[in-house]
Image (tube, helix red, strand yellow):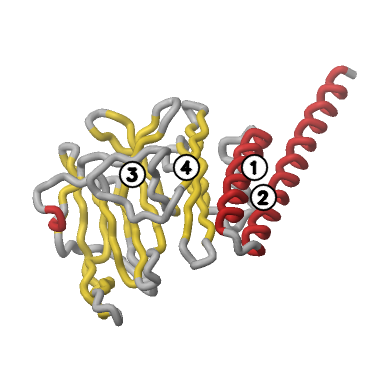
Amino acid sequence: MKKIILSLFVVLVTTTSVFGQAKTEREIKNLFAQIEKTNDDGKRTQIANQIQHKMIDAIFEAEDFFYDFPSLKNVGKVLSSDNQIHMYTWNILLTDGTPLYFAVIQHYDFGGIYVLSQSEPEIPSTTSYVSETNWYGALYYDIHPIKFKDKEMYLVFGLMTSTDGETQHKVIDVMAFTKKTVKMGAPSFITPWTGKKKQHRVVFEYDKDAQLSLDYNKKKKMITFDHLSPVRTTAKGKEVMGPDMSYDALIYKKDIWTYKEDVKVKNKKK
């Protein structure tokens, strides 16, 4: 009899949790719909902040680190290859088409939830650290654990739309976590664009209609990516870059990602 009662209790709790998650997700979808209906940018930002709070509520309701908001198609979800970091990112468009980005990040071991929101459109600097208070905003789509100066960090790839309507950006960044904060950036990248000065992250700008590949080879500790060359000039005289079917790389050695031009990439499909 006790076993029957216990089983019924577990079923009841599980069912209540599932219904709670579904209800919260419906509320989030309704909030996204409200953003599209208003022409007030202040109101859009306010609703986006509500979405962030609702997502945190849903995570707590789920009590499941791997919960991925199955019904939210406009939210990007990415899990680190060591199953330690679960990130959810999305953006909203202001009335002039400018995107603002938002993120909720979970850390499995720390049991923490980190909240990132972008206050205004910004292309990330390559020469400074970034935290929750000055995040540049991106849709992160890939994340891998790495060691930097014997500290556990995470290599992340992100995508962002330019505000000029002509280009888009991708970023290679590094994330470090404590139980209370997340910090982005590590002076570990050396590229031709900054001479011998170490960059905290790498930012690519390229044609809005092009696709730029970024791939991480864990075994070789190497990031490969499309080489960019000029493809067109805008009406305002701005030179726009695009992939030219060759590839470059960043190779990790002694805590430094060093640029290498014209690498061979096997089985690469555009």
Q: Do the residues labelled 1 and 2 touch (CB within 8 Å)?
A: yes
Element on which disc 2 rests: helix
Q: Is residue 141 visible?
A: no
Is 161 left or right of 45, judged from the image as shown?
Answer: left
Question: Of marks 3 and 2, which one's residue comes earlier in the chain?
Answer: 2
Q: Where is residue 169 in the image (x, y as percent from the top left)?
A: 34, 61
Looking at the rendered image, the disc whose residue lies closer to the viewer, 1 or 3, is 1
Residue beneath disc 3: 155
Residue 139: assigned label: none
Name the secondary structure under disc 3: strand
The residue carrying mark 2 is 28
Q: What element carries label 1?
A: helix
- Residue tagged by mark 4? 116
Question: Alpha-carbon distance for marks 3 and 2?
Answer: 29 Å
Which mark, by number, is residue 54? 1
- Rate crowding at label 3 as few (under 14), some (14 to 19) or many (20 or more) other CA atoms within 10 Å: some
